[in-house]
Image (spheres, rainbow, N blue to C red):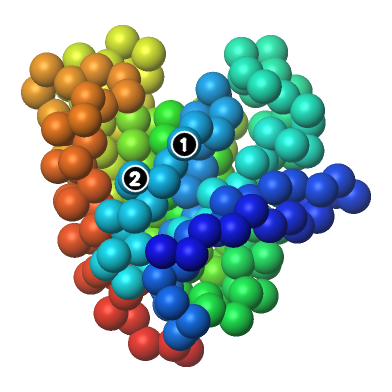
Amino acid sequence: MPHQRLNYESGGRPVAAEVFSPADESHPALIVLHGSGGYRDFSMLAQLITSQGYAVVVPHYFDVSGTHWADAQAISRHALTWTRAVADAISFAASLPFIDGERIALVGFSLGAYIAIAVAAEDARVKAVVEFFGGVPEAMAGRIRRLPPTLILHGEQDNVVPLSEGLRLKQLCIQRGICVEMETYPGAGHSFPAMVMLQAAHRALDFLNRHVKSAQAA
């Protein structure tokens, strides 16, 4: 599993990205978005994903704002800048020779899940979204008209991002005729424990295999 740290540019600032690739062929790609605590070691989960034939790109999207921890004030100030950095990460990923630019999905955790939904609602290059313990950005809820197939994964005892946020996103998708699936985990809170995360990762891979990996290039 080759791992490189590369850089791309967003808004005139360099953004680091962890890139994991299975081989030198053209693979579907997952752009993985961290939560409010910033990038953490992702290598174990990336190994599971790349073993299934995906490339993985993890942008350090906080680089564009110099953020280390995103509190409510930072989110209000920088959300649009981070969203643009993620859109630029899609362009960056599509430019890599071992990534099939027609098969790119977003996977977001907490804050990253909200950003994934915001980007996917505006960027048709995103073929699917998997969001872990997130929801739909309040300011966008009334404006979302489209999303790619979306999988919602949420703990039933989440006291940081309540389950109602995931349910609200599910209902919005149903109302808009968007393909949506949802899995909830009894007893799980925010940031799943290891065994629950493993179950959720396999659930996500099943979804992605159906909606991204098996898709034919346009």
Left or right of 107 in this view: 171: left
Which residue corresponds to the image point at 68% horizontal and 57% vertical from the top-left? Answer: 6
Q: Nearer the viewer, residue 212 or 150?
A: 212
**Callout 2: 10 Å neighbours few (<14), some, many (20+)?**
few
In terms of depth relative to the viewer, which is nearer, 77 or 63?
63
Say which mark, if any, is on residue 41.
Answer: 1
Find residue 194 and report its horizontal and vertical position in percent: 21, 30
Q: Secondary structure at mark 2?
A: helix
Q: At label 2, which amino acid type do we have?
A: Met
Residue 78, how many percent across, how many down?
Answer: 73, 29
Residue 96 is left or right of residue 109, and the answer is right
Number of numbered discs overlaid on the protein picture = 2
Q: At which x and y percent is residue 63?
A: 74, 37
Which residue sits furthest front? 2
Question: What residue is drawn where x is 24% and y is 17%?
Answer: 189
Q: Nearer the viewer, residue 146 or 127?
A: 127
| Residue 177 can be seen in this image | no
- Compare residues 48 and 215 and report the one nearer the observer: 48
Q: In the displayed structure, does residue 171 sit left or right of residue 80?
A: left
Q: CA distance from mark 1 to mark 2?
A: 8 Å
- The reply to whether dot 1 and dot 2 touch (C-beta < 8 Å) is yes
Which of the 4 image quarters holds residue 55?
Answer: bottom left
Q: Could you tell me which quadrant the N terminus lies in?
A: bottom left
Image height of 21 relative to 83, above or below: below
Q: Amino acid at mark 1?
A: Asp
Q: Secondary structure at mark 1?
A: loop
Task: Name the residue located 19 percent from the left edge and 41 percent from the top edge.
Answer: 198
Rendering coords of residue 10 (x, y %): 80, 51
- Image disc number at residue 149: none
Asked if 17 appears above or below 51 in the picture, the reply is above
What residue is disc 2 on?
44
**Label 1 crowding class (10 Å Cα cut-off): few <14, some 14-19, many 20+?**
few
